[in-house]
Image (cartoon, rainbow, N blue to C red):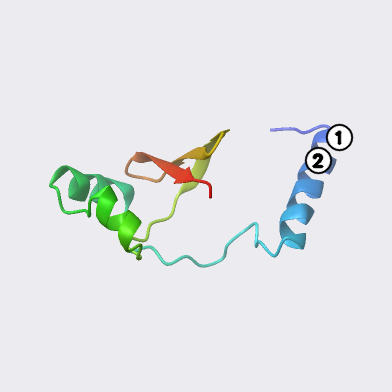
């Protein structure tokens, strides 16, 4: 894959912006307890907490990692799609 000089500069600038915000753009280590397929199995089996329980007492439920392939912001809601070697999942975030 070849990039033009402008594309390369844009990528370098975006990487620097992430670093300036305190974000490490290329994570060297990750702590992953479950892959996405396992999370989907838990959800289908009813082994995850309901949204009402989560809203009343948020807590860490699962830890996974993958590649962010889509991010959409729509008013007070944001959506993201994450993919790993096993499956893809969509996340929803509510802005306060």
Q: Is residue 34 visible?
A: no
Residue located beneath label 2 in the image: 10
Identify which residue, 86 or 3, lies in the foreground: 86
Whether 81 is drawn above or below 66: the answer is above
Question: Where residue 63 sits: x, y (%)?
Answer: 37, 61
Q: Is residue 69 left or right of residue 14?
A: left
**Which residue is located at x 42 percent, y 67 percent?**
31
If the image is split into quadrants, where does the N terminus sit?
top right
Q: Residues within 10 Å of mark 1 (few under 14, many from 20)?
A: few
**Which residue is located at x 46 percent, y 45 percent?**
93
Question: Where residue 5 sits: x, y (%)?
Answer: 87, 36
Q: Is residue 49 visible?
A: yes
Whether 81 is drawn above or below 32: the answer is above
Question: Where residue 21 sits: x, y (%)?
Answer: 72, 60
Assign a secondary structure to mark 2.
Answer: helix
Q: Is residue 26 left or right of residue 91?
A: right
Whether 33 is drawn above or below 11: the answer is below
Identify which residue, 73 or 40, lies in the foreground: 73
Image disc number at residue 6: 1
**Res. 83 image quadrant:** top left
Assign a secondary structure to mark 1.
Answer: helix
**Which residue is located at x 19 percent, y 50 percent?**
42
Alpha carbon distance from label 1 to label 2: 6 Å
Instruction: Verify CB contact (< 8 Å) between mark 1 and mark 2.
Output: yes
């Amino acid at each position: 894959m070849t990039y033009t000089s402008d594309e390369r500069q844009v990528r370098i600038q975006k990487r620097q912006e992430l670093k300036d915000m305190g974000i490490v753009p290329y994570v060297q280590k990750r702590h992953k307890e479950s892959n996405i397929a396992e999370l989907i199995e838990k959800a289908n089996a009813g082994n995850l907490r309901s949204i009402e329980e989560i809203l009343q007492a948020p807590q860490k439920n699962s830890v996974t990692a993958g590649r962010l392939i889509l991010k959409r912001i729509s008013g007070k809601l944001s959506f993201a799609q994450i993919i790993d070697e096993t499956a893809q999942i969509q996340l929803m975030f509510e802005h306060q």
